[in-house]
Each structure stands twice: as structure tokens, then as C-alpha cells.
């Protein structure tokens, strides 16, 4: 195995044998994780899920109960489950869930205007974006997702259409195709999704269908009786209303910002393999990681720019979380150190609290948390997911 990759993992605390084990085990994880959609009753979803996988899902004990994370056997193909097809569960790693839980949206002490505004600066494919919306369910919210990749934004749109858009009027979710390092930039950013506009569109097309079926004749008669109106029998297509959302733009500051930055993905090999289906053996995985680590200078520059842009979009008193699924010291503690030096006295690193539970994470400088990748998983005790790094700041 390439020595630089071994050294990389050694610096993150894995010994030689564990590195090989980790690289080999990426396709055969003991556990995988699902998050329950809060729009359905927990008990009902759990019994349906238990019936179809044949074992009882185990709640991830260190995440807040209302985050609804459960471990299921690693061999389960989530997309074949009826609970997944029916939109009752999301496939999502519990350490990814930790990034959203770290924002503390449930406490919602940041909300000063009656509306909670959240920016997810690298949002695709969108698992965390959906969790942000779910955490705020029932409150007035504007959640903005930004990503530079068109194809990945299409995946996010599908997710939002499946889980989110037909929710209550308090929910507004927008997606921008934009460079997160310069967001907002009205000259180059483009709004590619607006949940309220979509919901209105869906409702009015349903209305049109109903009209076509049952009320067409009556409408024809009514128009005739009114007189003077042309009896076309056709129902006018209404102009699409843009009363509030899309027009408002992206110029206000946010209460919460998540910067789940582009990284070398070496802590979450299952994600890396998911993105690149040709990564079958530990050798090809090693080569890919080596390539990414060789380009680490560019990566850390991008990460710092994203974190700075996220901070610029945050209002005073707001909360920002920086996250990566890398174990690299340069991409994690290194970026955080550079950020703190640039924003001395304004960015304050604060402890991350998941409701006082013991977590599988190790605390580092500036209250950061490191989740080691799964090597052994204890059910009933601490259950860990992929490798992850988190650091949280408030703006003073
Ligand atoms: C680690 S992934 C984010 C995962 C996502 N938060 C989720 O939960 O599904 C990093 C994302 O950053 C995006 N990205 C990379 N460079 C970017 C930039 N300059 N501006 C915005 N997004 C960027 C990538 O397209 C990718 O989707």
C-alpha cells in the first residue's frame, strides 16, 4: 500500500492493520444508518421497517432522540425498502447527522425575526439539507442550499421533491447554482429550485385537472350566463405568481450556516465508493485517496474560502458549523486555525453539545470533534458512522 496513505491514516490514529481493515471494510460495513422522516409516526415506521428487514433497528443513542437516527444491518439495500419508497426514511450516516445536530436548530435561540434562515453552502446531494428542514418543521423557515455542481443539484431537487415540497406554508427551501466562495453574487448565481413556487405549481395543475374533469361544462354555462365573455371553453392559463419567494433574492444574512466542505472524502469511503463505482478494491481506493491528498493545497484553499464566505453570510450572534468527512489535519484543524486567525475576536469556537450524551467523537483544539471511521461498532453502546470532523463557531 502507498506509504503516504498509510502515514495519512496513521496521523489520524489508525495503525497499519487498521488502515488495511478500514480500506477493505468500506464495502462491507456492519451497520448502516437511516433517519426517520418526522412527517410520519415513529412507531408506525419502525414496525414497518422491522417487518421488512427482519430485525429491530437500533436507535443511535448519542444523537438527540428527535433526530431519529437508527442503525440497521450493513447489508440492507435501503432503496429496495418500501419505507424508503414511501418517503418514510432517509439513508443517512449518523456522523453526517451530527453536523446538522451541531447547529443546534432545535434550541433555535438564533431566531430573531420570527423566521429562521439557514444557509447550507455545499448542499449536494442534500441529505443534510433535508435534515435541516426537518429539524425546523412547523417553524417559519427559509433554507437556502448552494452548490457548484449542476448534476448534484439535480439529485437535491429530486430529494426535495420526494420529501419536502408538499409541506406547510411555513417552509421555504431554495437551491442556488452558485460558487459558494462568492455567494451571494447576483450576476452569476442562479435560482434553480423554489419549494413554494413548485408547491403552487403542483396545486394549480391539480386544480386545472379537477376542473377539466368535473366543472368544465358548468364553467362554460356560467361564462355564457355572464354574457359578453367569449365562450371559448378553454380555461386560461394563469401567470405564474411570484408574490414573495424567488424575487426576494439572497441578500439577507443567515441565522445558521453549514459549510460541509468539499474534501478528500478519506474518512467516509462508502461515500467515495458511492460517487465512483469503479472503486472496488482497496488498491483503487488507495490510489484515489492519494491523488486527492496530493492536491491538498488547492483543497484547503477552497475550504478556507468556503468557510470565510459562510461567515460573511452569517449575522452577528449566528452559528456556523464547519464539517468535512476527511481525517486530514490540514483540511480540518489546519483550516480552522487559519480561519480563527483571520477572524480574531469575531469568530468564537464553542463546544458542540448533542444533549449531554456520550459521543464516539474525540474532542480536539477549538472544541472540534473528530469521529473515527467505523472499525468496530458496538450496538447498545456507542454507535459510530463514517469518519467526520466538526467545528462550531458563533459570530460576535
Ligand atoms: C461533502 S459534499 C456536501 C455533502 C452535502 N452537504 C450533503 O449532505 O449531501 C461537498 C459539495 O461541495 C460542492 N462544492 C465544491 N466546490 C464548491 C464551491 N466552490 N461552491 C459550492 N459548492 C461546492 C460539491 O459539488 C459537493 O456537492
Image: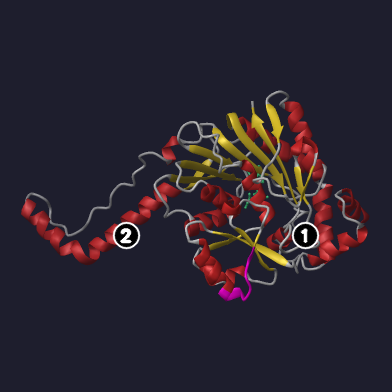
In the image, which is nearer the foreground, mark 2 or mark 1?
Answer: 1
| Mark closer to the chain start, 2 or 1 | 2
Confirm whether residue 372 shows in the render: yes
x and y, in percent, of residue 208 in the image: 27, 59
Magenta segment includes 30: no
Residue visible at 85% across and 64% down in the picture: 21
- Residue 83: give its label: none
CB atoms of marks 2 and 1 within 8 Å? no
Residue visible at 67% across and 56% down in the picture: 61
Q: Is residue 295 above or below residue 185?
A: below
Residue visible at 54% across and 48% down in the picture: 135
Q: Is residue 130 above or below residue 81?
A: above
x and y, in percent, of residue 299 in the image: 76, 43
The answer to which image quadrant residue 217 occupies is bottom left
Which residue appears farthest toward the top when viewing the image? 345
Horizontal placement of 269 versus 48: left or right?
right
- Residue 206: give its label: 2
Residue visible at 62% across and 42% down in the picture: 103
x and y, in percent, of residue 275 in the image: 69, 60
Q: In which quadrant is the C terminus drawn?
A: top right
Q: Which residues are magenta?
A: 51-58
Horizontal placement of 1 versus 284: left or right?
right
Confirm whether residue 84 shows in the render: no
Near-viewer residue (187 or 63): 63
Near-viewer residue (142 or 88): 88
Q: In which quadrant is the N terminus drawn?
A: bottom right
Q: Badge 1 is on which residue?
A: 374
Q: Secondary structure at mark 1?
A: loop
Amino acid at each position: 500500500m502507498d506509504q503516504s496513505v498509510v502515514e495519512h491514516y496513521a496521523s489520524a490514529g489508525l495503525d497499519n492493520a487498521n488502515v488495511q481493515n478500514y480500506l477493505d471494510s468500506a464495502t462491507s460495513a456492519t451497520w448502516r444508518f437511516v433517519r426517520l422522516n418526522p412527517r410520519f409516526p415513529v412507531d408506525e415506521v419502525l414496525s414497518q421497517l422491522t417487518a421488512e428487514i427482519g430485525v429491530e433497528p437500533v436507535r443511535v443513542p448519542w444523537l438527540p432522540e428527535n433526530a431519529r437516527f437508527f442503525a440497521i444491518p450493513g447489508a440492507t439495500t435501503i432503496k429496495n425498502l418500501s419505507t424508503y419508497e414511501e418517503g418514510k426514511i432517509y439513508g443517512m450516516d449518523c456522523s453526517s447527522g451530527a453536523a446538522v445536530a451541531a447547529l443546534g436548530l432545535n434550541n433555535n435561540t438564533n431566531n430573531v425575526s420570527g423566521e429562521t434562515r439557514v444557509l447550507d453552502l455545499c448542499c449536494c446531494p442534500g441529505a443534510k439539507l433535508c435534515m435541516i428542514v426537518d429539524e425546523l418543521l412547523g417553524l417559519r423557515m427559509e433554507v437556502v442550499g448552494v452548490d457548484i455542481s449542476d448534476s448534484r443539484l439535480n439529485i437535491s431537487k429530486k430529494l426535495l421533491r420526494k420529501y419536502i415540497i408538499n409541506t406547510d406554508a411555513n417552509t421555504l427551501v431554495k437551491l442556488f447554482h452558485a460558487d459558494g466562495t462568492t455567494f451571494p453574487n447576483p450576476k452569476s448565481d442562479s435560482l434553480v429550485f423554489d419549494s413554494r413556487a413548485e408547491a403552487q405549481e403542483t396545486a394549480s395543475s391539480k386544480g386545472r385537472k379537477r376542473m377539466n374533469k368535473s366543472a368544465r361544462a358548468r364553467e362554460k354555462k356560467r361564462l355564457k350566463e355572464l354574457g359578453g365573455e367569449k365562450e371559448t371553453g378553454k380555461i386560461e392559463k394563469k401567470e405564474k405568481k411570484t408574490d414573495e419567494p424567488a424575487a426576494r433574492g439572497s441578500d439577507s444574512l443567515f441565522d445558521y450556516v453549514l459549510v460541509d466542505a468539499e474534501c478528500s472524502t478519506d474518512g467516509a469511503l462508502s461515500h467515495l465508493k458511492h460517487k465512483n463505482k469503479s472503486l472496488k478494491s482497496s488498491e483503487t481506493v488507495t490510489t484515489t485517496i492519494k491523488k486527492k491528498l496530493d492536491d491538498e493545497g488547492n483543497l484547503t484553499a477552497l475550504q478556507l474560502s468556503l468557510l470565510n464566505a459562510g461567515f460573511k453570510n452569517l449575522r452577528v450572534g449566528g452559528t456556523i458549523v464547519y464539517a468535512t468527512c476527511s481525517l486530514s489535519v490540514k483540511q480540518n484543524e489546519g483550516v480552522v486555525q487559519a480561519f480563527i486567525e483571520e477572524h480574531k475576536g469575531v469568530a468564537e469556537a464553542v463546544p458542540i453539545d448533542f444533549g449531554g450524551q456520550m459521543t464516539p467523537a474525540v474532542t480536539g483544539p477549538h472544541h472540534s470533534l473528530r469521529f473515527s471511521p467505523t472499525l468496530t461498532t458496538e450496538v447498545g453502546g456507542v454507535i459510530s458512522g463514517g469518519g467526520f470532523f466538526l467545528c462550531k463557531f458563533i459570530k460576535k
